Amino acid sequence: MSVQPAFTSRLLKPRHKWGRLLATLVPVAVMGVWLKLDRIDRFFPNAGFGETLLKVASDVAFGLAWILLWVVAAAFGRVWWRTLASYLAMPASAVVAVFTVIHHEFVKRTGNPLTWERLSYAWRERGELEGLIGSEVTPQTVWLLVLAVVSTMVLPWLIGPLITKFLKTPSRRQKRLGVGLLAALLAASVWSAPTVSAAFALAAPVQFAVSPVREAVAYPSVEPTTQPLPSREDTRLVPRAGAGERNLVVIALESQRDASTLPPTKQPVTPVLDALKASSLVPERAYTVLPHTSKAVTAIHCGVAPPLDSKNSEADAEGLPMRCLPELLAEQGYATGFFQSATEHFERRRSTVRNLGFEYFLPVNKMNTSGWRKANYFGYEDEVMLVPQRRWIEQQDQPFMLSMLTVVGHHDYNLHGRPLIDFVDNNKTFNTYLNGLHYQDQFVGKVIDMFKDLGLYDDTVFVIVGDHGEGFGEHRVFQHDNTIYEEGARVPLLIHDPQRPAGVIDGPVSQLAILPTAADLLGFDVESPTDLRPSLLSGEPQGLIPVTCFARARCAATIDGDMKVIHHFGDRRDEVYNVVEDPYERNDLATEVADEWINERVDSTLEWYVDAERRSKVFAEQQ
């Protein structure tokens, strides 16, 4: 008798198929529920049984659906298909288990779900994100990943034969019942209660699958248009008498949340900025446009919304749809330079700086860093910029615009080798972050001292602004990209002009007001077909202030005077806060405010977002 038929028969009808299949699938279901319970304990430590059940229901439903999916696949069809399905279940389960672990670790560190958009961003920036990933991988992470692979690829071969002893081949009726139950479980896995966040409650694979759909329907539909955008050349500076005689310095402080959002500390964190406020033009509250550095830097220098995607389009070769302040000032005879203490490679910073219109760019990887401490995984301590900045300034025989971007405040907040000040107790990471803010505060003082030493202080306007804030779980969100609350959205903003008296601007303002205000202080009017914010010197109302998250359709806010509306795009109920009376956003007023009023503010920000997207898209198509 030939060996071939026996081998083929054994291959198509493997022994212990059902035991191995269950041993493969059950760990995936158990791991999903187990890790969700761990996240609930971290983010909702006081959750009762009912709340916990609502938050874990999707994971239970998906886990059971995952088991039934492969059981049904291995029970119907031709022999070869049933056998193939039983084998494919192992690598498929390994992928789902590994993704579940990665999603779990990502949520614990950021408070946000891991989406396709986020994975794509990480892949594009993988070279520069190696340090970030390395700083976040813990022994527990490695252990969970090993467990995910072993439990789905190794364990089934060991315990499958034992499980088979207790199993019977499913009957035809059981198979049909399984199909119906599978459909019901899949439907249940995509449901979340209106009282909980769907982004948190949905099982990791379900959240990953539905997020693109949610993003696609999140914003108002816009009719396509072939109408060209106004020419970039239509935006220009018009000099007034005495224009072009003063310098401009823009200091963008990395991850610098406004001091008013900090908890009580043992000593002041930002004494330099606190002192400067007494002699500066300061708004009551200032907000980032989008809490992500590349976007915020674009908004600060251009006065319009940056490209609101996560593809770093502000660095694309075709440039930006509007000329920004460096280019406009260069046209008026200014020298322009941009310095940063971070590497240029992350998010194509050199290309972004070029598109902003700067003539000179010096990142830290082109500086002499000998003797300077490394800062986090992106660069070196900010004082490394002072010597090359001074050298550049001394070479100029014309007025100049000098912009700089710090790095010490960035995650993971580590300034290697620098002794720490104890600002707060019992929170090492947050205390390290506060030390970073303190360092950046001292750096601002050294920049101003340098200008005094050079004899340029009186002839220079200083704009000091945070690019965005940083969250530490105050609202179950960490870091900054999607931290829409005050700790992530509110930033310091000081307009320090030695030739002007100090003052306070009533109400909230946006980073978008910096361009017209800086131009005004330098003696220029801005002519543009684009609707810009009024100069802060004009006394005109700034209108509604929009803020949007980095992830599309994740969150957005509208600030209207003292009130702030946070829109969650159906993930959960919208929130309303009086941020003057309640700066830490602990008392949600949504039930006390008319729905019509809330919807009007939400619609305003959504229309602003869609208009910015359309402008970027039309501009790219016209190039």
Image: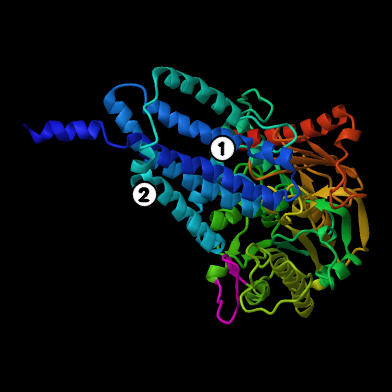
Image vertical order of residue 169 relative to residue 587, above or below: above
**Left or right of residue 277: residue 466:** left
State the image coordinates of residue 370 (x, y, percent, origin top left): 55, 80
Which residue is pictured at 61% across the width and 24% down the height?
A: 224
Which residue is pictured at 68% across the width and 36% down the height?
A: 54
Element under disc 2: loop
Main secondary structure found in the magenta portion: loop
State the image coordinates of residue 251 (x, y, percent, origin top left): 73, 63
Name the residue nearer the viewer: 31 or 14.
14
Residue with the mark numbered 1: 620
Q: Distance between the residues labelled 1 and 2?
A: 50 Å
Residue 370: in magenta span: yes
Image vertical order of residue 38 relative to residue 23, above or below: below
Quadrant for the N terminus, please. top left
Quadrant for the C terminus, please. top right
- Amino acid residing under circle 1: Ala
Give the magenta part as a residue range: 367-380
**Left or right of residue 507: residue 225:** left
Element under disc 1: helix
State the image coordinates of residue 382 (x, y, percent, origin top left): 66, 71
Which residue is pictured at 69% across the width and 59% down the height?
A: 333
User: Can residue 408 be seen in the rendering of this structure?
Assistant: yes
- Amino acid residing under circle 2: Val
The label number, if any, that marks residue 154 in the structure image: 2
Choose the circle earlier in sequence order: 1 or 2.
Answer: 2
